[in-house]
């Protein structure tokens, strides 16, 4: 058995409210994810799924616990994951291909190189004809595809997808699930995936974890 | 533009015609309120005298407006950098706006003389505030989720500013610029009223002193045209950034 890629130990998160009470969003959460594994996290809304992702990605600070990547405890994890949020969060003033390279802009990759990468990625998934369109002209499903490609181009080794298909209708959802499977075949991606749809979780994942409300 | 606003043009023409007829019928003395035809006649016959004043006012306005834009922009970013700086500067900005600028004009005249500088300062004082406040407002309003996305990519503050926050705040920045554009010419004229060698403000006063009411109206008309040119320029620049 290979060594786990991600190890989360005793992770807890409390929020301090204005009236000095604390709310526990996560309590002693443990998880190991192995290289190339697709792990789905299901649970009712409000059980701390998004908080967990925010903490893993370094967007929020944990109250206690440790997170290790490839065997080393990492205190600052920003930039180490490809994090895709519930909303597509495409920049309205950028075209599809310019949106896809946002992460590479942050990494200071020259535009000539990053746009070339974006175009070959779009070509690979037959989305080339959309490259010069603005997000306002795209359907909900297309927006999510673009957001996923942006996430992949930033980091294709470890993805965190937070209910990427949650806001879509069932037909679009089904086709996007198949599309995601196709995309992941091309990359050796390790994946943490939040959903509240058990069917979706069963279709896509190697392992399913259920989070309960505290 | 004419197609979009043609009813507005019709309304303006109708009002002018109404004004013309009202005065011509004799409801009001022509010396008190000249009809539009007299005003335009005065405008054309005095055009050679008016032109240097128009150019002077326009120059003061443009320089002041550009300076206010740069200052407003920089201030907006300063207000955004940290909440400490924001809480230190913001009240001062508000207080500064409660000072009547028209009362500062004589003071600026004493300090800087009759030249162009005090007028430019007054234009800056008029225009700076709406630009800074609208720009800062736009920067604060950037969707929190976008900031989280950038954080997850390990972007620095400046990368976030350049890649996301400045472009997303452009619409509010431009609405501040448009408000400022409509104030700008009036600011220059206030400066000239107090004392100047040249400019529409001076010309208006001279016209008033010699009871040339037509010429006062002609100057007001030119003020409107100047304001409109500046406003339209801002709108054209804005249209390049529309998405």
Image: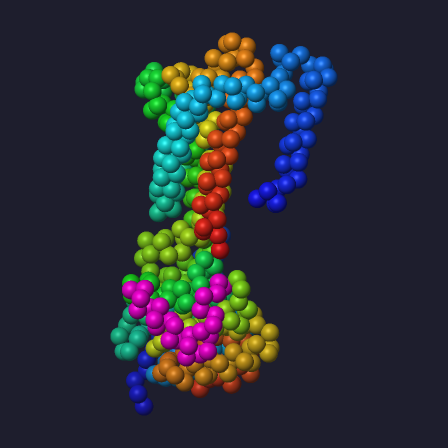
Q: Quadrant of residue A67?
A: bottom left
Q: Position of residue A37 (x, y in %)?
A: 39, 84
Q: Residue at x 62, y 22 (%)?
A: B36
Q: Is residue A180 visible?
A: yes
Task: Pick out the residue farthest to the top.
Answer: B210
**Could you tell whether B59 is left or right of B33 in the image?**
left
Answer whether residue A127 is magenta in the image.
Answer: yes
Q: Position of residue A11 (x, y in %)?
A: 38, 71
Extent of the magenta region? A110-135
Residue closest to the eye, B134 or A83 = B134
Which quadrant holds the N terminus of chain B? Answer: top right
Secondary structure mostly seen in the magenta stretch: helix
Q: Residue at x 31, y 66 (%)?
A: A112
Q: Position of residue B187 (x, y in %)?
A: 45, 26
**Could you tell whether A150 is left or right of A72 in the image?**
right
Q: Is residue A205 above or below residue B13?
A: below
**Could you tell whether A171 is left or right of B181 in the image?**
right
Q: Is residue A11 visible?
A: no
Answer whether residue B47 is magenta in the image.
Answer: no
Q: Is residue B87 above or below residue A213?
A: above
Q: Is residue A90 above or below residue B111?
A: below
Q: Position of residue A166 (x, y in %)?
A: 54, 72
Q: Residue at x 30, y 87 (%)?
A: A2
């Amino acid at each position: 058995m290979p060594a786990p890629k991600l190890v989360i130990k005793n992770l807890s998160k409390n929020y301090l409210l204005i009236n000095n009470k604390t709310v526990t969003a996560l309590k002693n959460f443990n998880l190991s994810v192995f290289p190339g594994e697709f792990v789905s996290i299901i649970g009712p809304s409000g059980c701390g799924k998004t908080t967990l992702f925010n903490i893993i990605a370094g967007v929020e600070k944990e109250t206690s616990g440790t997170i290790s990547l490839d065997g080393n405890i990492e205190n600052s994890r920003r930039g180490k994951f490809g994090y895709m949020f519930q909303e597509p969060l495409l920049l309205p003033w950028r075209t599809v291909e310019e949106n896809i390279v946002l992460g590479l802009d942050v990494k200071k990759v020259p535009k000539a190189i990053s746009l070339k990468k974006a175009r070959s990625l779009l070509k690979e998934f037959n989305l080339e004809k959309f490259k010069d369109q603005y997000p306002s002209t795209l359907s909900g499903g297309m927006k999510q595809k673009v957001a996923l490609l942006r996430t992949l181009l930033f980091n294709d080794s470890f993805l965190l997808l937070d209910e990427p298909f949650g806001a879509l209708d069932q037909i679009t959802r089904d086709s996007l699930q198949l599309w995601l499977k196709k995309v992941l075949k091309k990359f050796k991606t390790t994946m943490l995936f939040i959903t509240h749809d058990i069917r979706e979780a069963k279709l896509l994942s190697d392992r399913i974890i259920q989070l309960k409300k505290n | 533009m004419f197609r979009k606003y043609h009813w507005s043009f019709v309304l303006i023409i109708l009002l002018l015609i109404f004004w013309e007829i009202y005065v011509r019928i004799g409801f009001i003395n022509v010396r008190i309120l000249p009809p539009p035809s007299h005003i335009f006649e005065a405008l054309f016959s005095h055009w050679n005298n008016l032109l240097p004043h128009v150019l002077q006012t326009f120059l003061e306005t443009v320089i002041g407006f550009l300076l206010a834009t740069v200052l407003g922009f920089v201030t907006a970013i300063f207000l955004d950098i940290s909440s400490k700086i924001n809480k230190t500067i913001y009240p001062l900005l508000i207080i500064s706006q409660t000072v009547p600028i028209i009362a500062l004009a004589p003071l600026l005249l004493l300090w800087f003389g009759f030249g162009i500088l005090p007028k430019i300062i007054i234009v800056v004082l008029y225009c700076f505030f709406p630009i800074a406040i609208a720009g800062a407002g736009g920067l604060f309003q950037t969707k929190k989720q976008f900031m989280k996305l950038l954080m997850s990519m390990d972007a620095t503050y400046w990368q976030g500013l350049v890649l996301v926050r400045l472009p997303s705040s452009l619409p509010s920045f431009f609405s501040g610029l448009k408000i400022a554009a409509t104030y700008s010419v009036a600011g220059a004229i206030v400066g000239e009223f107090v004392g100047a060698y040249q400019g529409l403000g001076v010309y208006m006063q001279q016209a008033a002193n010699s009871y040339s009411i037509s010429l006062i109206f002609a100057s007001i008309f030119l003020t409107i045209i100047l304001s409109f040119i500046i406003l339209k320029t801002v709108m054209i620049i804005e249209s390049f950034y529309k998405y």
